[in-house]
Amino acid sequence: MPTISINRDLLFSALGKCYSEEEFDELCFEFGIELDEVTSDKLIILKEQGTERSEGASEEVIYKIDIPANRYDLLCLEGLVQGLQVFLGETGFPPFKVIPSQTVPQRLIVKSSTCSIRPYAVAAVLRNIHFDQNTFNSFIDLQDKLHQNLCRKRSLVAIGTHDLDTVQGPFYYEALSPDSIKFQPLNQTKEFTASQLMDLYATDSHLRHYLPIIKDSPVYPVIKDSNGVVLSMPPIINGEHSKITLKTRNVFIECTATDLTKASIVLDTLVCMFSRYCQDQFTVEICEIETSQGGIKNYPILKTRQEKIDVNKINRMVGINEQADKVADLLTRMCLTATVAGNGCLSVTIPPTRHDIIHACDVYEDVAIAFGYNNIEKTLPSTNTIAAQFPLNKLSDQLRDQLAQAGFTEALTFSLCSKEDISDKLRKPLSSIPAVHVSNPKTLEFQVARSTLLPGLLKTIAANRKLPLPLKFFEVSDVVLKDKQRDVGARNCRKLCLVYYNKSPGFELVHGLLDRLMQLLEIPLDPTGTTGYSLKACDDATFFPGRCAHVVFAGATVGVLGVLHPEVVTSFDLNLPCSALELNVEPFL
C-alpha cells in the first residue's frame, strides 16, 4: 500500500477547513484511506540521521497517508482533495475534456527500431498551465509515485515532462546505439553519450536502480524533436534543454512503455490531476501518435464508460437495504456519477480517473465505503453449519505428531527449487519428471515447482550438518505435478518425507518408522499388497542398488524408501550415509 506525504497546512487550505488530528483520522477512515503517521521533516531527519543533521529542518506538520494500491487518483494532494471534497458533498466531480489543438496538433512518431526495447509511446499537452512552488513539487512527486507503483519502477512505463516552448515538433521516438546518443542530461552542465551516462549514474542513489532496464540492450530508446534536440532517454533521464520550471506554461508529457494499457492509465492520471491548473480548467490538448505500423492514434483517451448495476444485488452483497436514489447518492460521493435507470438498476458513469473500477464488485465496495462499514447492521448468517478440519490436513497433522514423537524434527522448505535439485542431483533425467516449470524464474534456485520433498530436506541437513548426530528431519507438505486431466494442467499432491543422517545409514530405523505409521493408520502388512501394504524391491537411481523398495498399498505404488546413493549424498555437500522415506499421503484417507 503506497504512502503519500502531504503538508497539513496545504491540505487544510485546499479543503477549505481545518480538522483536529482525530477528526481527520476519522474522515480518512470513512473515505477508505488511513492516516498512518503525523510527523515533520525535522522529526524524520532526527530519527534517521540524528540531532545535528536535523537542525534548521522544517517543522511544518506532515501527514503520511496510506492509499489503496489501485487508487492512482489519490497519489497526490490534488487527487486527494478532489476525492474528499466530492465525498463530503462540497463539490461535484469535474468533467474532463480532450480538446484539439488550435493550430497543428503535436505529433510523436514512433519508429520501428523501438519494438525491440520499449515499443509503445503516448503523449498529451497541458496548455497554459500555471505552477507555483507547491503545485510544481506535487507534479514531480506524482510522477515519482506513479513510477514506483503502477509503472513498476519504470520497467513498464516511464514518464517524461518537457517545456513545450523550448522544443519543436513533430517528435521522434526511436532506438539508437548508445554511442550515437549524446545530450546534456537533467541537472548536468555538459553533454554525455548514453554509454557515459550509464557509468555516471552507476553510483547515483536514485537513478542507478533503473539502469538495468536497458543497460544490456544494443540500442537505447530516445525522444528527439524535429531539430534533433534530445528530450529524454527513457526510462533513465530527461534532457536539460526541455526541463520544466515554475515559468513553464505549456507542458508536453510523453510516456514510453512496454505495456500500452498501463501507459494510457498513467497519462490519464497525470493530466486529470493537473489540468485543473490550466487556464481552461480540466481540458487536455490532444496529441497524435504515429505508430511504428504507420497508423495514427490520438491521446490521451480520457474515456468514460457506463455500467448498469442492479440495486438489489448491491443491497444483498453489502448487507444494507437502501432505495435506488440513496445508493446513487452514495456512489456519487465516491466520484462515480450515478442515476436511477429504472427496473431497479443504476446507470453508473466511470470517470477516466477511476481505472480501479474493473468489475461490478468494485462498485459494490464503493457503496460500502460511502455507506460506512460501521453503519452496516450486524446480522447472523441465515444458515447454520458445523466447521470441521479438511480431512487431508487432519491426517497430515496426525502424522506430524507421530513423527515428532519418534524423535524427528519438522522442516518447512521452499516450494520452488532448481531443475538440478530434482534431476541431476537425484541422478534422474529432467525429461522423466512431471515437473511444473516457472516461465520467468528470477534466480536459478527457483526454476521449478518441487516434485519431491527430498531435495529440500537434504539441503536442510547440509545447512545443519554441524549439529550433533544423528540428524533426523521430516516434512509433510504439497508437491506439484503435471496433470493433463486438470484444467490448470497441474495438481498438488500431499507427501510425507523423512531423512535419517548418521555415520551408519539407519535403514532399519526408517523401515521401522514406516511400519509404525502403518500400524497407526490401521493398515496391515500384506505381502500381496492388495488389502494392506507391502514392500517390493526396485531399482531407483536415487537410491543405493539393492537397498531400495517401493511401498505398495491397495495394488498401487505409494512411496519409496531406501539408502541414498553416495553420489546423491555428495551432490548436496554431505559426507555421511542417509536413509530416506517418501510417501504419498492421499491414498490413506
Image (cartoon, rainbow, N blue to C red):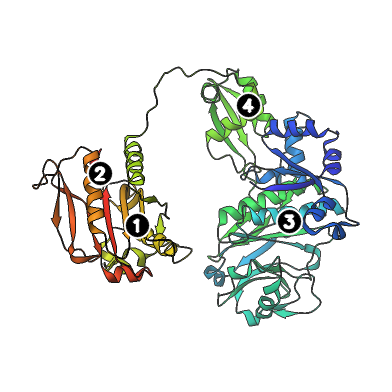
Q: Amino acid at mark 1?
A: Val
The reply to whether dot 2 and dot 4 touch (C-beta < 8 Å) is: no
The residues bearing labels 1 and 3 have C-alpha atoms spaced at a distance of: 48 Å
Percent coordinates x, y for residue 81 in the rendering: 77, 39
- Image quadrant of residue 433? bottom left
Front residue of this view, candidates 139 and 418: 418
Front residue of this view, candidates 38 and 1: 38
Q: Earlier in the sequence, mark 2 or mark 4?
A: 4
Name the mark nearer the viewer: 3 or 2.
Answer: 2
Q: Earlier in the sequence, mark 3 or mark 4?
A: 3
Q: Which mark is residue 517?
A: 2
Residue, disc 3: 125
Percent coordinates x, y for residue 389 in the rendering: 37, 32
Disc 2 packing (10 Å; few <14; some 14–19; many ≥20) = some
Classify residue 132 as left or right of residue 298: right
Residue, disc 4: 373
Q: Secondary structure at mark 4?
A: helix
Please give the name of the residue rendered at 52% of the width and 22% of the height, measured from the top-left corner: 316
Please give the name of the residue rendered at 31% of the width and 52% of the height, measured from the top-left corner: 497
Residue, disc 1: 436
Q: Amino acid at mark 3?
A: Val
Percent coordinates x, y for residue 331 in the rendering: 64, 29
Name the mark nearer the viewer: 1 or 2.
Answer: 2
Q: Could one spot residue 18 in this view of the protein? A: yes
Q: Amino acid at mark 2?
A: Leu
